């Protein structure tokens, strides 16, 4: 009888301690969405600043080859409904043919880096960010 009480108390004590640790963490509770948004903004801004020379070079190469807009948008449908437009580097010309740097952009996945602007706009999170 006494053994049963000890066994039944152990999981509860462990659960209480775990709940106390989680409630003390800023990553749980009511501040989680705002903290996640702040981390998204800081992360995207730092990445954009760090990658600005490479992004500028790619933009100049696309502009020199196509003469048109550097960025394109792709409509992305959300799971719960609705849609957003994701930014990408344009890799096709006006007549639909691919550019000469298309293979490099797709292989290195640089063509998706402008999605960091979508992160800054709050449309996607860095956790959702895939290249």
Image (cartoon, helix red, strand yellow):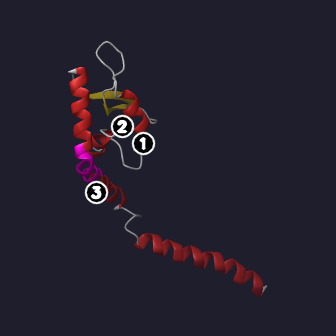
Q: Position of residue 92 (x, y in %)?
A: 33, 21
Taking depth in this image into account, of 118 and 122 the one nearest to the observer is 118
Label annotation for residue 112: 2
Mark 2–mark 1 CB contact (< 8 Å): yes
> Principal SS element in the magenta part?
helix
Q: CA distance from mark 3 to mark 2?
A: 22 Å
Q: CA distance from mark 3 to mark 1?
A: 19 Å
Task: Please identify the residue farthest to the right as the structure is shown.
Answer: 1
Residue 48 within the magenta-colored segment of the rendering: yes
- Residue at image coords 41%, 33%: 106
Disc 1 designates what residue? 130
Q: Is residue 31 rendered to the left or right of residue 3?
A: left
Q: What is the count of numbered marks?
A: 3
Disc 3 designates what residue? 38
| Res 75 → quadrant | top left
Taking depth in this image into account, of 10 and 48 the one nearest to the observer is 48
């Amino acid at each position: 009888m006494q053994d049963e009480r000890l066994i039944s108390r152990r999981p509860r004590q462990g659960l209480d301690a775990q709940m106390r640790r989680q409630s003390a963490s800023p990553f749980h509770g009511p501040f989680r969405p705002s903290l996640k948004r702040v981390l998204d903004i800081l992360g995207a801004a730092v990445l954009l600043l760090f990658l600005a020379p490479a992004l500028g070079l790619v933009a100049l190469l696309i502009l020199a080859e196509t003469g048109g807009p550097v960025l394109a948008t792709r409509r992305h449908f959300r799971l719960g409904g609705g849609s957003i437009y994701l930014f990408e580097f344009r890799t096709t010309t006006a007549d639909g043919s691919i550019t000469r740097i298309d293979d490099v952009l797709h292989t290195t996945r640089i063509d998706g880096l402008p999605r960091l602007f979508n992160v800054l706009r709050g449309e996607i999170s860095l956790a959702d960010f895939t290249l």
